[in-house]
């Protein structure tokens, strides 16, 4: 797992706040996951946002399930994220291919273009997961029409709460700094340890 993504997941831990409603707890998780996903998208790695945000999105689904009283495994959370993502993933994937190509040509600018789209995609997926678990608590079946409405509303809402480009850049830089520090710490010899013989196998 890339150090940046591992650092994101290590920092994306969430405890249900009993003082908040389910909706308020879910809101905190969705916005946090969307911001973290956008920060990953800023990294100048072509197509990274299409491949590396999936663990963040799966963890978001797991947290939302917990809020609504469902003990979801990590594997099941990934499956739910994939199932819900089919609702509007095809158009998004096509746009992300173009943005991935933009990153290859202009890495930094391409990342800044991609971040808002990834934020909106993750935000909408979070709203879909929230709707999914809400309906399950009420014993209601999944509704394709309802999911489409949720996505449309989430797109509009995400535009209103979208962080600035500098927010994504600052978070990406901080996560990268922590990941590099952690890697350096892991590579350092323990105090008192004998130096490694380079010729020894």
Image (cartoon, helix red, strand yellow):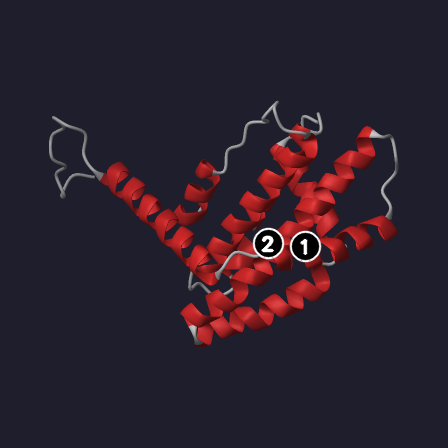
In screen coordinates, is 157 left or right of 185? Answer: right
Residue 197, quarter of the rendered image: top left
Q: Residue at image x 66%, y 45%?
A: 126
Helix, strand or loop at label 2? It is helix
Q: Is residue 109 visible in this depiction of the protein?
A: yes
Q: Residue at image x 46%, y 56%?
A: 168
Residue 37 placement (x, y as % from top left): 53, 51
In screen coordinates, is 186 left or right of 164? Answer: left
Image quadrant holding the C terminus, namely top left
Looking at the image, which is closer to me, 101 or 19?
Answer: 19
Q: Residues within 10 Å of mark 2 (few under 14, many from 20)?
A: few
Q: Is residue 196 above or below residue 105?
A: above
Q: Residues within 10 Å of mark 1 (few under 14, many from 20)?
A: some
- The residue lying furthest to the bottom in this view is 105
Q: Is residue 2 visible in this depiction of the protein?
A: no
Mark 2 sits on what residue?
A: 161
Looking at the image, which is closer to me, 11 or 196?
Answer: 11
Callout 1 touching callout 2 (CB < 8 Å): yes
Helix, strand or loop at label 1? It is helix
Residue 41 placement (x, y as % from top left): 49, 59
Residue 65 placement (x, y as % from top left): 68, 32
Q: Residue at image x 81%, y 55%?
A: 148
Residue 11 placement (x, y as % from top left): 45, 38
- Identify the mark at residue 157; answer none if there is no mark: 1
Disc 1 versus disc 2: distance between alpha carbons?
A: 7 Å
In screen coordinates, is 124 left or right of 140? Answer: left
């Amino acid at each position: 797992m890339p150090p940046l993504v591992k650092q994101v997941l290590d920092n994306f831990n969430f405890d249900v706040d009993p003082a908040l409603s389910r909706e308020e707890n879910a809101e905190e998780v969705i916005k946090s996951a969307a911001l973290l996903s956008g920060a990953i998208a800023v990294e100048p790695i072509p197509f990274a946002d299409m491949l590396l945000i999936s663990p963040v999105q799966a963890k978001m689904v797991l947290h939302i399930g917990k809020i609504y009283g469902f003990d979801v495994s990590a594997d099941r959370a990934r499956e739910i994220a994939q199932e819900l993502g089919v609702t509007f993933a095809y158009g998004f994937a096509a746009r992300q291919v173009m943005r991935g190509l933009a990153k290859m040509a202009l890495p930094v600018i391409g990342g800044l273009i991609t971040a808002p789209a990834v934020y909106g995609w993750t935000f909408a997926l979070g709203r879909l997961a929230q709707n999914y678990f809400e309906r399950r608590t009420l014993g209601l079946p999944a509704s394709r029409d309802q999911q489409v409405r949720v996505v449309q509303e989430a797109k509009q809402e995400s535009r209103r709460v979208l962080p600035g480009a500098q927010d994504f850049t600052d978070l990406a830089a901080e996560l990268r700094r922590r990941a590099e520090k952690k890697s350096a710490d892991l590579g350092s010899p323990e105090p008192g340890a004998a130096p490694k013989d380079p010729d020894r196998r």
